[in-house]
Image (cartoon, rainbow, N blue to C red):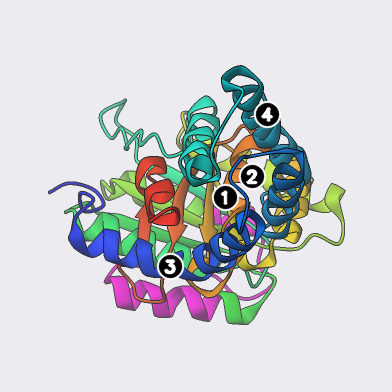
Amino acid sequence: MALFSLFGKKEKEDLDKGLEKTKQSVFSKIARAIAGKSTVDDQVLDELEDILIGADVGVETTLRIIERIQKRVSRDKYIHTNELNRILKEEIVALLEEHHAGLVQGFDFTKGKYPYVIMVVGVNGVGKTTTIGKLAYQFSKAGKKVLLGAADTFRAAAIDQLKIWGQRANVPVIAQEMGADPAAVAFDTCNSAVANDYDVVIIDTAGRLHNKINLMNELSKIRKVIQKVIPEAPQEVLLVLDASTGQNAIEQAKQFTSATEVNAIALTKLDGTAKGGVVIGISDQFKIPVKYIGVGEKIDQLQLFNRIEFVDSLFK
């Protein structure tokens, strides 16, 4: 069975619904900006700039998009306001293409004899544990043997929450007492995974940002002990961000990408926010692919990010 269901009718409906608030916010404002105007001029572009920044696309990324549209306006001399949405859509797709965002790489379980290890990082409250549970469910549904490691030992609630998600996804969890060494939990998890032929290991980590040096040291230690057991791991370091926090998500991404090597991003809670533009900004600014998006609370509402479908739903 395919990992993560192929993008079908249900997935598209979930995505449409998840982006509804962003879509309404952005396009109602664009409609007002071009009302009574026939051509795309500097005033329209100034207003479009404000709208995109308001949707948390980010200043740098917005300026890049506006610059691309300006080039088209000066090249074509005359662009009707009716064409603005189409041009904006094309430029956003092109921008996401540059950074391979939404280019589904899939998962390679064939390399070597080791499990595929995903180390999950992110601050508390962004939906990290929920994302791990949903990922575990998707892998398990696809027939993969999954093991979870509760290496966020800083909060008792984090361990309990991961155990609940493990039960929901029907996958086991390796855990120790609150306050235990997170690296020891990661080590035990990986040892157990190798000994028992698991396909996928997902390790939760503590979401503390108050001291970047401590965070860096802790994540580095976890990575090293994982590699003692599985030299190729972690194949994925997944940063989970809450889309509804907009620019705060970008700040968190800065902190974590400077503390550890992140090679994939998951954006949660897109369904509850009008700040869905943050997907575009994060992809552009950090040059790290957005791999997963959360478009609802249900266990099957985590999707592999598909840039074509994402932009299509945004401009529907």
Q: Mark 1 points at which residue?
A: 279
Residue 50 sits above or below residue 263 on the image: below
Asked if residue 271 is among those painted magenta in the image, a careful observer would answer: no
The stretch of residues the image draws in magenta is 159-186
Residue sitting at x 28%, y 65%: 13
Nearest the camera: 161 or 99?
A: 99
| Residue ID for mark 3 | 18
**Which is nearer the N-term, disc 1 or disc 4?**
4
Instruction: Residue at 64%, 69% (x, y): give it.
Output: 153
User: Where is 86 relative to 192, above or below?
Assistant: above
Q: Residue at x 41, y 72 (%)?
A: 296
Q: Name the residue under label 4.
A: 70
Q: Of helix, strand and loop, which one carries label 2?
A: helix
Q: Tag 1's secondary structure? A: helix
Q: Which amino acid does label 3 sit on?
A: Gly
Q: Are discs 4 and 3 less than 8 Å apart at CB?
A: no
From mark 1 to mark 4, how far is it between C-alphas?
Answer: 23 Å
Q: Disc number at residue 282?
A: 2
x then y, percent, for residue 146: 31, 56
Mark 3 burial class by Cα count in 10 Å: few <14, some 14-19, many 20+ = many
Q: Are marks 1 and 2 in contact (CB under 8 Å)?
A: yes
250 vs 25, left or right, is right
Residue 258, quarter of picture: top right
Nearest the camera: 205 or 244? 244
Determine if residue 97 is in view.
yes
- Circle 3: element type: helix
- Dots 1, 4 in contact, CB < 8 A: no
- For badge 1, the amino acid type reads Val
